[in-house]
Structure formats: structure tokens, C-alpha cells
Image (spheres, rainbow, N blue to C red):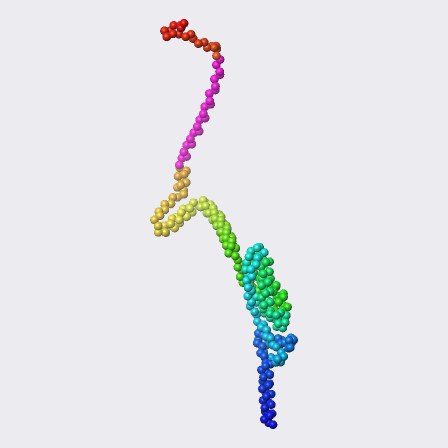
């Protein structure tokens, strides 16, 4: 009798251990447990730690609540200003309601991926090339709003969307490089012109100052001679005072101006016509060789 009781107790203990082993579950800190009993959702979501379910009746599904980093494949599209580009992005999202993420959508990760690709194509078609290159913060916010609106009904929250890279055709890259080079050249010319204007103003002020004090010009000339003499070269500089040049210019007499040429004499007046008073001419009589009249 005692042996039978011991055997029954041992069998009961073994059954209890087997039941506990089959029913015991451990939910990690970053997970939540969703229990389905005979295919129906139990209202309570299991918190992290040790939990029990009914073996062969309940099914426990663990949902990761960590932030998921999902890259969006590069999408090719045409911008609003008719430029073909390839844009890729990355989406950061997490599950906020484990039960909704399992019940509302079959595979929430695949759904978020497809929705991100569609939204990225839509953003490309609505934006200009300049916005894609320089105004990405605004586009990121627009993508986040487009993804967050349907995802919130799936128990998923979009934390952030970032556009990673914008690929341009080679012809467009060369055109943009030429445009940037021309713009830099234009700015360089404007800067040089502004520098020349400022330098001319300063030189004008210096010229007026030296005109008021002629000794300043001599001092500047001596400084220039010292700067040239400091270099090791064979150049010989002979400065000529400006006052000497002015003195020579004043002492040199002006050359006489050539006299103006005399005007040509007027043409002679034509003579009046002479009247013929002799009358008609008469041929003389023919003569022989001895001077006599011919017969």
C-alpha cells in the first residue's frame, strides 16, 4: 500500500514537472507576449518575465518592441523639373501595440517596407532637384507623415525617416559642375573688381596726400629702393626725383609751331573771245620753182 502511494506521488510529481515545463514561458525585457487561446486573442498582453500558458491550448507569440532599422531600396523617379534621379532612404520604426501588430496586418515589417517605397516615389515626383539636394529635412518630415498615418493603425509608430543618397546621371553631374564653376568664376571676378576699386580709392587718397607733402614721395621712393636692394640680384636702380623731371619739363622751350601754308592763288580768268575781221581766207596763186606765176 505504501509502495503504491509512493508510486502515485512520484507519477503526480513527474506529471506536474512536465506540465510546468510545457506551460512555462519567459518573456524578455524588450518583448511582449500575445496569447491566442483556440485561435482567439486574449485581452491581456504578457509583460516581461516568467509567465504560464495552458499547454496545447494557448499559443504565445513574442513581439519585439525594439526600434527596427529598415533600409529602403533605391527608387528611380523623375522630379518635378524633369530630372531622373535615384533616391534611397532608411526608416526607423517600432511596435507600440503588440496585439494590433499581429492582428491588423499579416507582416508589419513587409508592409512598412512597401509603404516606404511607395511614399518615396511619391516624394520624388512632387519635389524639385534642388529640394532633394539641399532641403532634405522638409522631405524627411513629409515622408514621416506619409508613413505614420497608416502605420499607427497597425500598432506601429514611425520614429524617423532619412533620405541617405541622391544619385544623378553623369550628364547632370557635368552640367552642375560647369554651373558651379561658372558661378565661382563670376564671384571671383566680382571680388577682383571690388578689390581694384578699393585699391584705386586708396591710391587716389595717397596721391593727394603726396601732392600736399612732396617729401612723402621721396620717402616712398627710398623705401622702394631698400626693398629692391634687399634681394640678391644684379639689378641696378637709379631713382630720379620727380621734381627734377618737372624742372626739366618747365625749362625745355616749346618748339616753334610751323607756319600755316599760304593759300594757293586763284586760277586766271579766261580771256574774252576775239572777233575775226579778216574775212574768208584766199589761197594765193600757184608759182613755179623760179618764183614766177604759173600759167
Residue 275 sits above or below residue 267 on the image: above
Residue 292 visible at all: yes
> Residue drawn 46% across and 10% down?
281
Rendered-image quadrant of the C terminus: top left
Q: Where is residue 172 shown, x and y percent of the image?
A: 52, 55
x 61%, y 77%: residue: 59
Q: Is residue 180 visible?
A: no
**Magenta-drawn stretch contains 142:** no
The number of callouts visible is 0
Q: Position of residue 86 (x, y in %)?
A: 54, 60
Between 290 and 279, the one nearer to me in the picture = 290
In this view, which residue lies farthest toward the front?
295
Q: Nearer the viewer, residue 213 or 62?
A: 62
**Residue lying at 60% horizontally and 83% vertically, measured from the top left:** 19
Extreme residue in the left direction:
234
Residue 267 drawn at (x, y percent): 46, 22
**Quadrant of the frame with the N terminus:** bottom right
121 vs 187: above or below: below
> Which residues fall within the magenta stretch?
252-275
User: In the picture shown, does residue 202 fall above or below 150?
Assistant: above
Residue, far bottom? 1
Magenta stretch, main secondary structure class: loop
Residue closer to the observer: 234 or 156: 156
233 left or right of 145? Answer: left
Say which residue appears at 35% left-offset and 51% top-offset: 232
Q: Quadrant of residue 147?
A: bottom right
Percent across and percent down for residue 104 are 63, 70
Q: Is residue 188 left or right of residue 1?
A: left
Amino acid at each position: 500500500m505504501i509502495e503504491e502511494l509512493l508510486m502515485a506521488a512520484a507519477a503526480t510529481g513527474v506529471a506536474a514537472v512536465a506540465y510546468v515545463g510545457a506551460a512555462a514561458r519567459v518573456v524578455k525585457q524588450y518583448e511582449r507576449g500575445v496569447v491566442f487561446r483556440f485561435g482567439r486573442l486574449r485581452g491581456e498582453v504578457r509583460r516581461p518575465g516568467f509567465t504560464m500558458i495552458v499547454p496545447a491550448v494557448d499559443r504565445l507569440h513574442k513581439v519585439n518592441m525594439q526600434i527596427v532599422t529598415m533600409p529602403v531600396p533605391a527608387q528611380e523617379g523623375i522630379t518635378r523639373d524633369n530630372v531622373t534621379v535615384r533616391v534611397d532612404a532608411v526608416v526607423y520604426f517600432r511596435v507600440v501595440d503588440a496585439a494590433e501588430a499581429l492582428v491588423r496586418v499579416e507582416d508589419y515589417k513587409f508592409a512598412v517596407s512597401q509603404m516606404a517605397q511607395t511614399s518615396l516615389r511619391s516624394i520624388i515626383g512632387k519635389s524639385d532637384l534642388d529640394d532633394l539636394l539641399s532641403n532634405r529635412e522638409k522631405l524627411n518630415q513629409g515622408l514621416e507623415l506619409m508613413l505614420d498615418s497608416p502605420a499607427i493603425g497597425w500598432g506601429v509608430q514611425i520614429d524617423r525617416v532619412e533620405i541617405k543618397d541622391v544619385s544623378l546621371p553623369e550628364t547632370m553631374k557635368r552640367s552642375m559642375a560647369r554651373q558651379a564653376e561658372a558661378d565661382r568664376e563670376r564671384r571671383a571676378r566680382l571680388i577682383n573688381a571690388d578689390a581694384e576699386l578699393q585699391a584705386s580709392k586708396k591710391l587716389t587718397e595717397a596721391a593727394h596726400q603726396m601732392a600736399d607733402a612732396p617729401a612723402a614721395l621721396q620717402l616712398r621712393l627710398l623705401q622702394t629702393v631698400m626693398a629692391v636692394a634687399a634681394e640678391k640680384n644684379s639689378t641696378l636702380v637709379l631713382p630720379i626725383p620727380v621734381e627734377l623731371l618737372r624742372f626739366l619739363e618747365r625749362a625745355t622751350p616749346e618748339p616753334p609751331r610751323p607756319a600755316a601754308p599760304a593759300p594757293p592763288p586763284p586760277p586766271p580768268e579766261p580771256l574774252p573771245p576775239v572777233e575775226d575781221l579778216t574775212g574768208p581766207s584766199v589761197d594765193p596763186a600757184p608759182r613755179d620753182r623760179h618764183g614766177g606765176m604759173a600759167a
